[in-house]
Image (cartoon, rainbow, N blue to C red):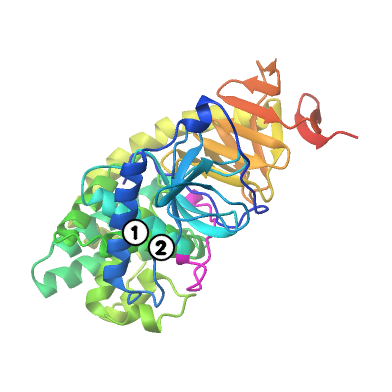
Amino acid sequence: MRSRLVWAPAGAGAVLLLFSVGGAAAQARPDVGAAVAVFDQARALCEADGGRDWGVSLCGPMLIADPATRGFVADRDGLETPLERTGAVFQGRLPDAVPIANTAVRWNGRVWTMLIAPLPQEEPARSILLMHEAWHGIQDQIGLAATNADQPQLATEDGRLSLRLELRALSAALAATEPGERRRAVEDALTFRAWRRARFPEAQAAEDAMERHEGLAEYAGRRLSRDEAMIPHLAEHLRKGDRVREYARSFAYYTGPAYGVLLDEASPDWRKTWDRREGLAGMLARAVGVAPSSDDAAFAESGRRHQAETVRAEEAARAREQATRTAALRTGLIDGPVLVAPVSGANFSFDPNRVTPLPPEGSVYGLIRAAAAWGVLEVEKDGLLSTDWSRLSVAYAGTTPTDDGLKGDGWTLTLKPEWRLVPGRRDGDWTIARRP
């Protein structure tokens, strides 16, 4: 997984127009020559696919943005507001309300594949990133709209235990050289997943949804990267996934491409015949003729092949540490005074590796940015996003006013002039409202 992955929903909020800005900040943009090389590489990769994998071309509009200055270089002009042309490319500065992320974003009349500068130089990471984000640009067209689904089960001891064993089994399946060995590892992976879903019945829909969103994007990125060692690299990627601290928003980057590649072998036409409502794991089970058991005996038998007792001990120790952290988060973000920002329809960017479920209230994001009608809330230390993505809360204690908003412990609020802070529902809480 790339060191900092952020995501924002394409189409969230209103379409935003470019405005011109003078001064040095406007001139600080990604290098044009480097951007042209990226655009050429992306075009070569998507043209090599020729729309065969998903029935549509991944060669869509692309821009590279500098998060520090918001300057960008694009491979084509805007449709609603013209951009500044420099040779074969176009330049400008993104409005504050447009999230800067590795993502797909609707802006200036187009759906852009947006990339954060600087891009990775090493391969295949660079090619994977290009095709992963290009896939997000076409997912609406192929019936796989962006979605959000909290995964509280993946913060529990049993949920993490079963997921880590599933990752180990999927890695073993990809690395297997004999069909019988691969089938047994696949059955183990499906057994661990069935065991988890028997204990967390709501997990199936949530996990399937994120695998259709981020999992398939990562699968597309790896499949279209033209990496000659794609399967060994993916097996190693899954082994790295076994050491991840937070799975709630990151698990699908591992499981999605693994199930996709295994489906390619078991059912090569699956993308053409797939009912979009079906989960990847369920399709693989049917394709290989496996009916996984969810009972403890089957779990234990499969677990012995993947060092379950070692993983169980590690997760028991982590659960004790996590209980302390969760209690502290509840004290600061639920029990104590908070600033509650209304964020329905906002544009978001965040780090999926720093997400801690806090059910039933939502999930705590260690790094998140929300841009809404009232302005921008940037959080670098713990913001609680409600389950329905309508409220983003930060601890209010210790805040200080700024020229255009408020600053707290690990967060900064920038308000537009027509908005102000008003008392919230509880004594000591605050929220944001339009000035009368």
Find residue 256 and report its horizontal and vertical position in percent: 35, 61
Give the number of marks.
2
| Residue denoted by label 1 | 131
Find residue 281 and report its horizontal and vertical position in percent: 36, 69
- Disc number at residue 148? none
Q: Quadrant of residue 417?
A: top right
Check if residue 154 falls in the magenta segment.
no
Q: Residue farthest to the front?
A: 87
- The answer to whether residue 358 is seen in the rendering is no
Residues in magenta? 138-153
Amino acid beneath label 1: Met
The answer to whether 226 appears left or right of 418 in the picture is: left
- Disc number at residue 135? 2
Give above or below for 409 relative to 176. Answer: above
Residue in front for this viewpoint, 44 or 125: 44
Residues under numbered marks 1 and 2 in contact, where contact means CB atoms less than 8 Å apart: yes
Q: Residue at x 28, y 49 (%)?
A: 126
- The answer to whether residue 94 is seen in the rendering is yes
- Looking at the rendered structure, the secondary structure element under dot 2 is helix
Q: Quadrant of residue 79?
A: bottom right
Which quadrant holds the C terminus? top right
